[in-house]
Image (cartoon, rainbow, N blue to C red):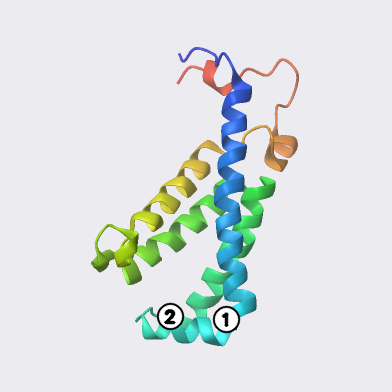
Amino acid sequence: MLPPRRFPALTDTGLLIGRLAVGAIFVAHGWKKFADAGHSKTAAGFDELGIPMPDLAAVFATYVELLGGIALIIGLLVPVAGVLIALNMAGAFWYVHMDQGFFLDKGGYEYVMVLFAASLLLAGTGAGRFSLDGVIWGRRGENAPDRESIPA
């Protein structure tokens, strides 16, 4: 049995800060694909990179980044958004960055790896109390135990 957390607000604050930062990154990238490049330019770029089904991949990447980023920021359906964003980053790793080495300045995968890990971390932990998920799916009653105090 895990001991109860001493300062649960610190964990929830950390999740909020992480969600805001990662969500803002994805909203910016999704918006860039949506508004600046447009679907046809994004799909053409994906085609040049050898990404299969570039039209479908462009739609997936654009909306997962844009809507998934918004979901992270407001804390809504964070486990789903986190998994979808992680899948998007796995594709970026596989098709774009894997053969470029580790470091970002050489086109490597360090940035993609951090975003992948952060997205999976949020998918696994959830949004925390300071989120719409926390409001909607929070405790079902005042006497509900913390999940840490429930034996595995």
Badge 2 marks a residue whose secondary structure is helix
Q: Residue at x 62, y 46 (%)?
A: 20
Quadrant that contains the N terminus? top left
Label 1 close to label 2 by CB (< 8 Å): no
Location of residue 53 with respect to 102 vertically, above or below: below
Horizontally, residue 88 falls left or right of residue 96, namely: right
Quick one: quadrant of the C terminus?
A: top left
User: Which label sits on residue 46?
Assistant: 2
Q: Is residue 27 left or right of residue 90?
A: right
Residue 38 left/right relative to 48? right
Amino acid at circle 1: Ala
Q: Amino acid at mark 2?
A: Phe
Which residue has dot 1 on it? 37
- From the viewer's side, name the closer residue of 143 and 60: 60
Which residue does the image show at 61% across and 61% down from the upper left? 27
Measuring from the top left, give residue 10's x and y in whole percent: 59, 25
- Whole-percent x, y for residue 7 in the image: 59, 17
Could you say which is closer to the camera, residue 29 or residue 131? 29
**Res. 99 image quadrant:** bottom left
Q: Position of residue 33 (x, y in %)?
A: 57, 74
Mark 1 / mark 2, whichever is N-terminal? 1
Crowd band around label 2 with a 10 angstrom C-alpha radius: few (<14), some (14–19), many (20+): many
x 55%, y 66%: residue:
29
